[in-house]
Amino acid sequence: MIQTSFRNWALDETPASRSQANWGRRYRIWLSLKSNPLAMIGLGIILLFALLSLFAPLIAPYDPSLQNLGNRLARPSAGHWFGTDELGRDILSRILFGGRVTLGMVVSVVAVVAPIGLAVGCVAGYMGGVVDSALMRITDVFLAFPRLILALAFVAALKPGVESAILAIALTAWPPYARLARAETMTIRNTDYVAAYRLTGASRWRIMLRHIAPLCVPSLIVRTTLDMSSIIITAASLGFLGMGAQAPSPEWGAMIATAKRFIFEQWWVATIPGIAIFMVSLAFNFLGDGLRDVLDPKQN
């Protein structure tokens, strides 16, 4: 009854308030997204991994750092669903706790790069001239280097660890967001309603903050969702190369690095964390494709 009432209220063609109109728009986006099976599969996988990682202390059958050398490299069994690693640690428990590290790094990177890219792109696109040229040349410098190589250089200049990896990935991931926000801003700045705000005396900073940046957000959301898979792979790569999370932290990339010498005889030690990385990366791609179809007006 409540769901039906909310549906009718949200889908009302003549909303009585701005709040009702906003909720109606969000509900239509959700209905469109829900009609995409792959997007819902991706969303389900992401939510599943997020919940498993969040409640890892309650779900994990063992301490992820607990060693049992007498049971090292044990095959998957009822006692250890995914087997044990070279130190006898339960792989399932380490996967659950490792999700906290890997997904936490991804969320932290996105929380940093999205606002930075949005700010740089909006300022460059709206100001134009020397400001635009200066900001875009800086962006081009960062785009000229492969992300992983540049991230390795930043981590090497700091010190290996989760915090350094987050900062390094963030410093290398913001340029595409700035480029996208700039392109959106250059399209929006010449519209009639922006000209109307200028005539009312609104400052350029107010126009960028209140009237241009919000219109760039949908495109950035799509870009962020699609980019999360590459951020996950970059974070796992840094862990694999010893520049990310340090032992005995149960990070997925670091788990593969320590298990690579057992991949032929004890395949499960390296394969299980690899499958986790693959599933989460694929899920973000599915969700990103669905959001692009829903939020990009050119796709409709």
Image: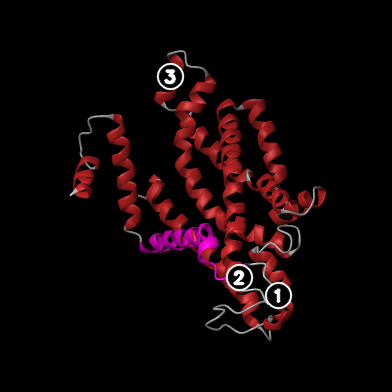
Say above or below: 151 vs 134.
below
Callout in the foreground (3, 1):
1
Say which residue label 2 marks.
273
Q: Are marks 1 and 2 in contact (CB under 8 Å)?
A: yes
- Location of residue 210 in the rendering, given as x and y in whole percent from the top left corner: 46, 26
In percent of the image, x 45 and y 42: which residue is there? Answer: 218
Say which residue label 3 marks.
197
Would you say residue 300 sits in the magenta stretch? no
Crowdedness near tag 1: few (<14), some (14–19) or many (≥20) residues, C-alpha within 10 Å:
some
Callout in the foreground (2, 3):
2
Crowdedness near tag 3: few (<14), some (14–19) or many (≥20) residues, C-alpha within 10 Å:
some
In percent of the image, x 39 and y 53: which residue is there? Answer: 293
Q: How far apart are marks 3 and 1 (CA)?
A: 60 Å
Q: Which colour scheme is used?
A: secondary structure
Residue sitting at the far bottom: 265
As rendered, which of 285 and 5 lies closer to the eye? 5
Say which residue label 1 marks.
259
Give the residues drawn in magenta, as a range: 37-63
